[in-house]
Image: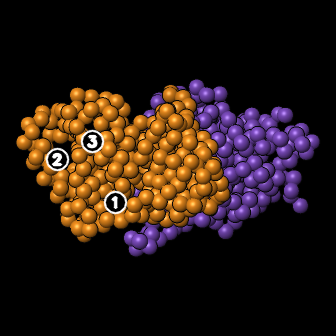
Chain colours: A purple, B orange
Amino acid sequence: MDLSVDVGGFVVKNPVIAASGVLGYGEEYARVGNIDWFGAVTVKGTTLRPRHGNCPPRIWETPSGLLNSIGLQNPGVDEVITHYLPQLAQFDVPIIVNISGETYEEFQEIAKKLADCPHVTALEVNVSCPNVESGGMAFGTDPGSCYRATRAVRRNWPGPLIVKLTPNVTNISEMAKAAVDAGATCVSLINTLLGMAIDIQNKRPALGNIKGGLSGPAVKPVAVRCVWEVFQSVSVPVIGMGGVFSWEDALEFIMAGASAVALGTAVLVDPYAPKKIVDGIQSYCESNGIDSMSSIVGIAQV
Amino acid sequence: MSQLDILDVPAKVISVDRREGDAFRAILYAPEIASRAKPMQFINVRVQESLDPLLRRPFSLSDVNPHVGTIEITWMVVGRGTKMMTQWKPNQTVHVLGPLGNGVGPDFLENKRKLILLAGGTGFAPIQLLGVRAREKGVDTILIYGAKSRHLLMNTDRLKEVGCKICTCTEDGSYGSKGLVTDMAELQLELIAEEKIDPENLVALGCGPTPMLAAIKNLFADTNIPLYISLESKMACGYGLCQGCAVRAVDPQRGYYRVCTDGPVFLAKDVELESE
C-alpha cells in the first residue's frame, strides 16, 4: 500500500520522519540502520554560528521520559551546508533543516544561506527550544514573536516551511495560527516540555543547565491533545511528535490530526523503530481496508 | 560512510551470577557482537522490554569469547536498571546494541613491552578484557587496582591466571594495601623507572571514578608514558546521535567530545576532568 502523504508542499513516502536532533547528520545512524526507512529526515537545530552546547550532565532519565539540555550543539549553518548536507543528500530522503536564531535577523540570514543550498527540501523554524538562553522558546510563547520569526524566514525561503511549536503555552492553537498567517505551510508539534529533576545523591539539579526538555512516552498524551487542538484551528498539515514509540502511537497521532509523525527519543532507545513503525502502519492499514494515509488523518475528530 | 557495523541483537542470557562483594556478572550469547568487539568497547543494553526504565544502560565488555559467541558484562547495582538486571534469568532474551565506542585496536600494543593498567572500583570490568588480550600478545602487564573497601573490588582471578602482575589496595585497608590507586601507581612508576624501559615501549590505561582519573592524569603528566583513560557517562543512544554524554575537550575549539563515539578511550591530555 502507498503510505505517502503531503506535509505542506512536499510529499513523504511514508509518514515517519526523524525529528530534529536525533539523527545527527546521518553518518552515525548509517552504522546501525537505514536512513531511507524514514519518510524524511530533520537535521539538528542549526544556528548561524557554531554552538558547543550546554554543560554536562545533559541527560537524565525520568519515568518513561528523558530530560535533556543539549543546547543546540551544532557546527553552524555554513559548515552544515558545505560539509554535512552533501553527505546526508546521498540518501534518497527529503531533508528538513531545523533552524534556530537568537534574533529575527538571524533567522532571516540562516534562511537565506539555506535557500541557496540544493539539498534542502524544507525548513523547520525552531521557536520552541527550551535549552538556550536567547531566542529559542521565547519566540514560540507569544503569537506576535512567532509570527515575526516565521515571517523573517519566509522572506528568504520560498519552499516548504514548517514551524515547530512548544507545548509550554496556554493556547498552542494561537501560535499555530500565527505561524500559518506568517506563511508556514506546516506546523510540527510538540517540542519538549520544560522540566527538571534533582539528583539527591549530589543534592543538586540533575542537569548541568538546571532545566531541560522532557520527551518520551511520558509526554505523549500532552502531545496528542496539542495535535488535536491545532488540527482544528489551522488548515495546513500537522507533523505530530512527542513520545511516538510504536505504530499504535503513530496511528493515535494521525487519527488526532497529524499527517505524519516524527520520532525522537524512540530512535535513541531502538534504532530499528522507524522500520517497525512503518511496517506496523502498513499492516494496520491493509487489514483495516484503508487505502490512503490522508483518509485517516484526523479521523478521530468529533 | 561506514555502514552497518553496529547491531541491535536479541541476546540470550546464558547466566547471571553474583560475584565476590557487590558485583554481578552476566554472560550473554551474542555471536555477532562477540566476533566484532575490541577491548574497551561497550554495549547498550535494554534492561527489559518496557518503557520504564526507558533508556538502555551502557556496559563495557569484561570478557569476550568469539569462539563460542559470548560476551560478558560485570556490574554493581547503582540504580533501578542495574538492580533489575540482577533478576535476568537464563534463556531470556535481552536487546543488546553494539559493539560501541572506539575501544583499542591492535595498534594500541604495537611495540609495547609493558602495559600499566589502573582501575578503580567497577572500572576494572573493561580493564580485565584488555589485560587478557595484552597477555595473549605477550606484553608484560601490571594492574593497579583499588576501591573504597573490599566489597567494592571485583574478582581479578582471570588476570592472575594469564600472568598479569596485580597490586590491590583499598581506601579503608580492608584488602590489599591501604591507600589510593594513585599512591600505589606512584610507587610502581618508580620501580618501572628502574627497569630503564624506553617510554615509547610503555603504555598506560586507566578506568575508574573521575577523581581517580584526574589524579593519575596529574601523576603521568610528569612522565613520558602515554596515558589513556576510559570514561563513563550517562548515555541515551550510545552511538553518537544525542550528544548527551558530552565531556569537555582541552582544546577550546573542539568544545565537547562524545564519550560514546569519540571515546570511551581518550588520551588523558585531551579531556578536561571535573576534579582537576
Instruction: Bin the neighbour count of mark 3 within 10 Å (Cα to Cα): few under 14, some 14-19, many 20 and up.
Output: some
The numbered mark, 3 or 1, whose residue comes first in the sequence reads 1
- Answer left or right for A29 relative to B62: right
Of marks 2 and 1, the one in the foreground: 1
Q: Residue at x 89, y 61 (%)?
A: A302
Q: Which residue is mark 2?
A: B221
Whether A11 is drawn above or below A246: the answer is above
Of marks 3 and 1, the one in the foreground: 3
- Residue B110, picture quadrant: top left
Whether B168 is drawn above or below A89: the answer is below
Whether B54 is drawn above or below B11: the answer is below
Q: Residue at x 34, y 60 (%)?
A: B153
Q: Which residue is mark 1?
A: B153
Residue B173 location in percent, x, y? 23, 67
User: Do the CB atoms of the residues marked 2 and 1 lie less than 8 Å apart?
Assistant: no
Q: Which residue is mark 3?
A: B163
Q: Chain of mark 3?
A: B
